[in-house]
Amino acid sequence: MNAGAEDARTTVVVITHNRRAELLRTLARLRELPERPSVIVTDNGSTDGTAAAVRSAFPGFTLLEPGRNLGAVGRNLAVRRVRTPYVAFCDDDTWWEPGSLRRAADLLDERPRLAGVTARIVVEPGGTEDPVVKELRESPLTGPDSLPGPTLGSFLAAATVLRTDAFRAAGGFHPGLWLGGEEELLATDLLRQGWWLSYVEELTVHHQASVLRDSTARRILGIRNTLWFTWLRRPLVPALRRTAHLMATVPRDAASVRAFAYAAAGLPWVLRQRSPVPPEIERRLAALQRARRSSTARRYVG
């Protein structure tokens, strides 16, 4: 296929909340892609004029307005409208390198049990590699030789193209987690259903971190959701060990106390929905957990 030609196999889904200027920059980049993908934007209840700006500047894109902040579930809402075999997720401060969506679709076309491919992340404006890339590149997991790169146990939503049918079959992003590390639960459920995930070096996503993010709030959600994922899917002994490890290693401050309090408050629904993974999947999760202990990209700071 011509590298400069349009490609109708992938739809890009973007969620946003009160980041109008950054979103408009991202959408302009997406409109310039040679693949000319369909783009669906879920505006999660912005109050800064985001929706009006998108309607005015990008009339060819689909805009969804749920009227409140759905977090990651805003992606589920968008995927209901997707009619292409693949969906590329994108945050309002990330954008895909020209040609990467086409190459991702090629790789997925060739491998029917591959659920998703995660791209290399380049941090802008400096053009440096995101620290998480080293973790992806050095994944301890093994998989079929047919995979296009290292086998992954999770993915990064802002840098991943997923098979639309696999996303739907696994239930999409869990509404209980809202936002913050929400990919881990979906990835585990994909693995349970026999799908594979892979990192692909030749795919690229650019990330220029929003200046509007609240790092402390994100840390609280990250710890809370890590605990909830652990209690939802890990067997009892690994779950207890993981909980104890987090208690011993997170910063000893008010934010961590709040995160554990929020996690404890959710125990009733978490225990009702608890469904531990089988031993084969638990072995993969345990290997990932061991590898992440030395990762500089997995520190609960902020």
Image (cartoon, grey):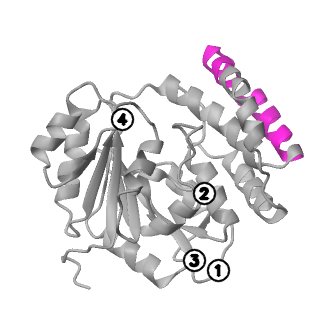
Residue, x 60% and y 19% (percent of image)? 255
Q: Contact (CB < 8 A) between labels 1 and 4?
A: no
Kindly report the distance in space between the C-alpha atoms of the residues bearing marks 4 and 3: 32 Å
- Residue 265 location (% of width, % of height): 70, 23
Label 1 vs label 4, nearer the camera:
4
Q: In this figure, which residue is indicated by the disc labeled 1?
A: 144
- Residue 181 location (% of width, % of height): 56, 42
Q: In this figure, which residue is indicated by the disc labeled 4?
A: 44
Above/below status of 8 relative to 156: below
Residue, x 64% and y 18% (percent of image)? 258
Q: Earlier in the sequence, mark 1 or mark 4?
A: 4
Name the residue type under label 3.
Arg
Name the residue type under label 4.
Asn
Magenta region, residue range: 237-260
Label 1 vs label 2, nearer the camera:
2
Kindly report the distance in space between the C-alpha atoms of the residues bearing marks 2 and 3: 14 Å
Q: Contact (CB < 8 A) between labels 4 and 3?
A: no
